[in-house]
Image (cartoon, rainbow, N blue to C red):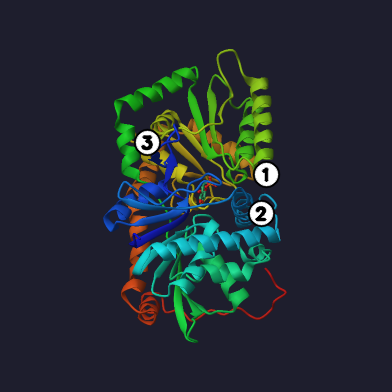
Amino acid sequence: MTQADFVVVANRLPVDRTPDGEGWRRSPGGLVTALEPVMRSAEGAWVGWAGQADVTVEPFDFDGTHLVPVTLSASDVQLYYEGFSNDTIWPLYHDVIAEPTYKRAWWDAYVKVNQRFAQAAADVTADSGIVWVQDYQLQLVPKMLREMRPDLTIGYFHHIPFPAYGLYAQLPWRKQVLEGLLGADVIGFQRVADAGNFARAVRRQLRYETKASGILVPDAEGGTRVALAKAFPISIDAESYIELAQKPEIQQRAKEIREGLGNPRKILLGVDRLDYTKGIRHRLKAWGELLEDGRASVEDATLVQVASPSRERVEAYVQLRDEIEMTVGRINGDYDTTTHTAIRYLHQSYPREEMVALFLAADVMLVTALRDGMNLVAKEYVASRIDNRGVLVLSEFAGAADEMGSALLINPHDIDGLKDQIMRAIDMPAAEQGRRMRALRKRVRDHDVEDWSQDFLEALSVFHEKSSRAAAEQITRDDDGSTPEREPIDETDAG
Ligand code: G6P
């Protein structure tokens, strides 16, 4: 059996079926691009689901990576993926924007499927290898894997927010999930606040001590080991966006897009998975009101909203689509003319080339998420703006806001404030656009996705090279020398 020294475990494999259903092609996602060079040089393996229920695929090699498909039955998809992952954890971790559903049968399936992923990783990882687990669908894998293979060094990265303790405390399986994550040596989060929320939940629920970013975890031998819980903000492959934006055919395509919309003075753009966390409704409300107030007109400005289909069998997503499509229909019905439209709504996914053309055509990019782990679209937009023009309107509830202070930061719940900032973006003088865009682009270029994976893997390598005790000593030395934190014992206070 093939074994690898470096293994990624994620809910999805980094490949999709080609349209003819015969072969495979690389999936477009950022994580896949980020890890491609690491996977190739390490001759790594990737454990994940191929995206179809009840289909068993034998392990195979693709582009220098050994792929190990995990089979999910139709019932696993329903209970583990659509249920516990996307109807319990997803809404709970995004500040309960939609109400989470707690079902014991979903939890049981989540445990069972996590066990299957952990077993597949345990089987494919070589002696003393490194395993990097990705995201909220697999929070129990680190502990399961450590129990099966104590020789491994285990990392986990959490791509979505980790909620404040008062919300997290709702989860009936809150202790088990924390213990699951603490099986990792390094637990990475998007924002400093997420790592802080996690550490607090650990102190309150498990009563473990934390010291700076280290968490003291009791080990199997009755001693303690240290797990590191820290922010490692993810990024994009900025150079690949820059290269595309430089291509004459993509610049030409951007012009065609403008013309196709009737050459409005300004184009506003939203690009999201169709998800209730993205604040699409708030954005449409603000835009509809600006048209109603007469502060904007359709000859003057058009909103292009790309909403890519997502999780279409989960009820909250079905409802959201209905609401959004009704709102778009109403606004367009009220304000469209025969030559211009208020909103060009596209319920589709596009290849990266078309996205870059859209970014180049858009004078204003609207990222109005109510809660978002990072939001890579914000980074893709600025990377693509090689002309240093365009304005990013960015929700302070997106992780990207921590790094992108030169955007126009907004609170999407404040519709009047949002409207004002949209107008400010539409009217922003070129010199100010340039100043802000340069600062934003510098940040994204200086901290791209390769830096992200390197930073994380470097932190993990400390655990790989040293014993857990020595790693603990180094972490405590490198950190700020703060005193250990303990939470007072008051089980009733979930604040
Ligand atoms: C978010 C999550 C990812 C997930 C992606 C698409 O970005 O953090 O883990 O893969 O959404 O969602 P899907 O349910 O289609 O995998």
Question: Are the two marked residues, 1 and 2, in contact with CB atoms closer than 8 angstroms?
Answer: no
Callout in the foreground (1, 3)? 1
- Amino acid type, residue under disc 1 in the picture: Ala
Percent x, y for residue 160? Answer: 53, 55
- Residue behind mark 2: 96
Query: What residue is shown at x 67% (from left), y 44% (from top)?
Result: 316
User: From the viewer's perspective, is residue 419 above or below residue 475?
Assistant: above
User: From the viewer's perspective, is residue 228 above or below residue 252?
Assistant: below
Q: Which mark is residue 235?
A: none
Q: Quadrant of the N terminus?
A: bottom left
Q: Is mark 3 within 8 Å of ligand 1?
A: no
- Residue behind mark 3: 385
Mark 1 or mark 2, which has the lower sequence index? 2
Q: Residues within 10 Å of mark 2 (few under 14, many from 20)?
A: some
Question: Are the two marked residues, 1 and 3, in contact with CB atoms closer than 8 angstroms?
Answer: no
- Residue behind mark 1: 316
* Mark 1 residue element: helix
Left or right: where 31 falls relative to 89: left
Q: Residue furthest right?
A: 492
Percent x, y for residue 238? Answer: 34, 44
